[in-house]
Image (tube, helix red, strand yellow):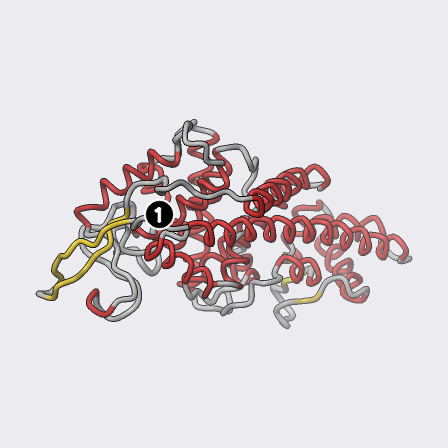
Amino acid sequence: MHRDATGQYRVTHYDEEQVRAFVPYPLPPNPPLKLDGSLQQMLEAASLALGRLDGVKTLLPNPALFTYFYVRKEALLSSQIEGTQSSLSDLLLSELGEKPKKPLDDVVEVSNYVAALQHGLHRMQQDGFPLCNRLIREVHEKLLSSGRGSRKLPGEFRRSQNWIGGSRPGNALYVPPPHTEVQDCMANLEKFMHAKNDGISMLIRAGMAHVQFETIHPFLDGNGRVGRLLITLMLCEAKILSEPLLYLSLYLKQNRNEYYELLQKVRETGDWESWIRFFLEGIRSAAEVAVDTANKLLDLAKLDRDTIEKSDRRVNSMLRVFEVLNERIIISISEASKSTGLAFATVSNCMNELVNLGIVSEYTGKSRGRLFTYDKYLALLSEGTEPL
């Protein structure tokens, strides 16, 4: 389909160099998105997959725990797209007050992402606050509250020119709007996110809003992560998801070259249809992978519980320790003792039995201050999270 330009170039200057910065037109696109038969089928498939994902938590013994780990997986994956080298075990160790294996700044970035998402959800769900530019700035402030980027105006739209790729705007792959245009561009995006009379489904609206946000690039740092957070926040605000169980960043990480190419193609040619196909396929794929992982976790817990029940020593105590492992995955003897109410020596013996059964392993290799991990559970949650 032929579509008019999706924006216009504004000539500006940076360090005495002439720069062509791209200013996007407000959404929706003109002419409107062509929702042909195949695209409509993809929309329906993505919607059905999200419905199954949202319903999977009713099958789980501890839905809050499931959400806890999925939020952290999305945080990790989204941060890895930007080059962070942390792992899920590093994040969990850090939350236990232990020293992670990867650089601390990388772990801090992932922790900040978790805090940013939780802040956004709390403001919407508990405070009744709308998803608006003020909330987007609050989320950004949480994201850059510490670590790398903490000096790049957390919570504020940029006041200078930025660029993507290259060493300066003059040789960049893409130059976003001048900072003087950011406020108006974001105001238009806010209107589009909440429009009710344009016939655009919320899934497609979220996909378009993500592209527009990345095109505006309103912050000095953290734009990619905030842009991906925006998708989750929009789906939760619309109650398409009641919990942030979708880790779309796995799909974007695995297809990151196509991801960046399609973002640029929208800007250059107005090919929204190719982007929406990619986006809907990502939603469907990510939702189905998440449901599959949930079912595998349930099967694993049942299998290991059966193994414990067939053992002939300390069955009741081991089951109590095992239930705590399902909630913590990485835990010390003293923490397990506190959580179960069992004596330290009893828990220590139970852990040794669980190691012998091949259910857990000791993480530190030390004789004191040992940590035990539920390896197979952690491995299932960590699928796809290997650093780039």
Foreground of the two, 327 or 315: 327
Picture coordinates of residue 1, whole percent (x, y): 42, 50
Residue 314 in the image, given as x and y percentages of width and height: 85, 54
Residue that mark 1 sits on:
212
39 and 325: which is toward the camera: 39
Q: Which residue is rendered at x = 70% and y = 37% of the image? A: 58
Residue 150 appears left or right of 337: left
In the image, residue 347 above or below residue 355: above
Please name the residue shown 42% across and 39% down the image.
Answer: 120
Which quadrant would residue 27 be assigned to in this image? top left
Number of marks drawn: 1
Q: Is residue 346 left or right of residue 270?
A: right
Q: Position of residue 8 (x, y in %)?
A: 23, 51
* Relative to 39, residue 96 above or below: below
Identified by mark 1, the residue type is Gln
Q: Single out the residue that lies furthest toward the left.
A: 16
Query: Residue at 48% across / 31% down in the picture?
Result: 125
Q: Is residue 273 visible?
A: yes
Q: Is residue 297 above or below residue 386?
A: above
Q: Residues within 10 Å of mark 1 (few under 14, many from 20)?
A: many
Most foreground residue, 35 or 156: 35
Residue at 23 percent across and 40 percent down: it is: 184
Residue 143 vs residue 218: left or right?
right
Farthest residue toward the front? 2
Element under label 1? helix
| Res. 245 visible in picture | no
Q: Position of residue 302 (x, y in %)?
A: 80, 51
